[in-house]
Image (cartoon, rainbow, N blue to C red):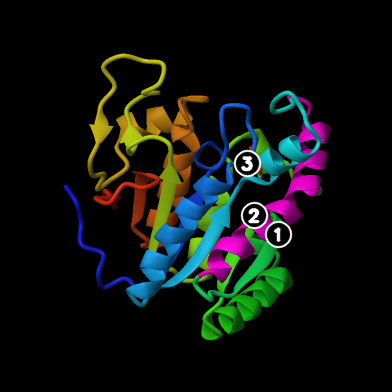
Amino acid sequence: MARDFSGVKRVVVKVGTSSLTNRNSRLEPLKVRKVVREVMDLRRSGKEVLLVTSGAIGAGVGKMEMKGRPKELSLLQAAAAVGQGILMRVYERYFGRYGQPIAQLLLTKEDFTHPERSRNLKNTLKVLLRWGVVPVVNENDSVAVEEIKFGDNDLLSAHLAILSRADLLILLSDVNGLYTGDPKREKGVKLLHEVREFTPQLERLGGRRGFGGMRTKLQAAKLACSAGIPVVVARAGERRVRGGC
Ligand code: GLU
């Protein structure tokens, strides 16, 4: 069931690595362009948008001409450090075509839990949004590895939605929505069109490791929903999005 989000004023949109990179794990600028178009659609309908984006590792993998995404954490962190500036340049280029100013924020979990840091973050965001800027957020991968290990910024985006008092969290992915299993590996998994409560069955799914990124999406959804923020999991480019809680 598609839900009406026309009353929404502030949205956090999260886009993951798989929606931004190609088969060789390299950043695909045309995919970034698509994300920018979607964000600008929201902006044009009068919404404030905060964008949480991966893709730094992919940009670094391309720049350093690696054969693919490395496995070792320190290599991933270094690739992200190389790629973050490149990623922002690509965003600058496409947002610039709409005359849309953007800002870079590199955050870790502590920035949401530490009182002074979260207060500072809130103040910065307040001004950026008042200026009509789109904050472009990523995990600060050189000092934190939480989202590299699991999550790809899902939880970070839920924390940001809560801190910024967003009305909606959209998790863009390369799957159609929230499934009962990994749609790429398992047969007979069902697409959950709407989740109104976190049932024991869903909790069990949330406890499962690595099923197409659904685990951290569920955790992020639970976190945001507990703060009263509805969450949508949708394929990047999907017009009819599905909502929950
Ligand atoms: N922060 C990472 C990046 O920008 C995303 C995490 C991951 O790809 O695992 O590439």
Q: Is mark 3 within 8 Å of ligand 1?
A: no
Which comes sooner in the sequence, label 2 or label 1? 1
Q: What stretch is highlighted in magenta?
A: 71-97
Magenta residue check for 92: yes
As shown in the figure, which amino acid type bears the numbered disc 3?
Leu
Using residue 228 as the reference point, say whether residue 160 is left or right of it.
right
The reply to whether dot 3 and dot 2 touch (C-beta < 8 Å) is no
The reply to whether dot 2 and dot 1 touch (C-beta < 8 Å) is yes
Q: Is mark 1 within 8 Å of ligand 1?
A: no
Residue for badge 1? 106
Residue for badge 3? 27
**Within-10-Å neighbours for mark 3: few <14, some 14–19, many 20+:** many
**Within-10-Å neighbours for mark 1: few <14, some 14–19, many 20+:** some
As shown in the figure, which amino acid type bears the numbered disc 1?
Leu
Query: Is 211 in front, or is 196?
Result: 211
As shown in the figure, which amino acid type bears the numbered disc 2?
Asn
Which comes sooner in the sequence, label 3 or label 2? 3
Residue for badge 2? 138
Decide: is 171 above or below 75: below
Q: What element carries label 2?
A: strand
Q: Does the residue labelled 2 lie within 8 Å of ligand 1?
A: yes
In percent of width and height, residue 68 lies at: 70, 25
Decide: is 6 above or below 81: below
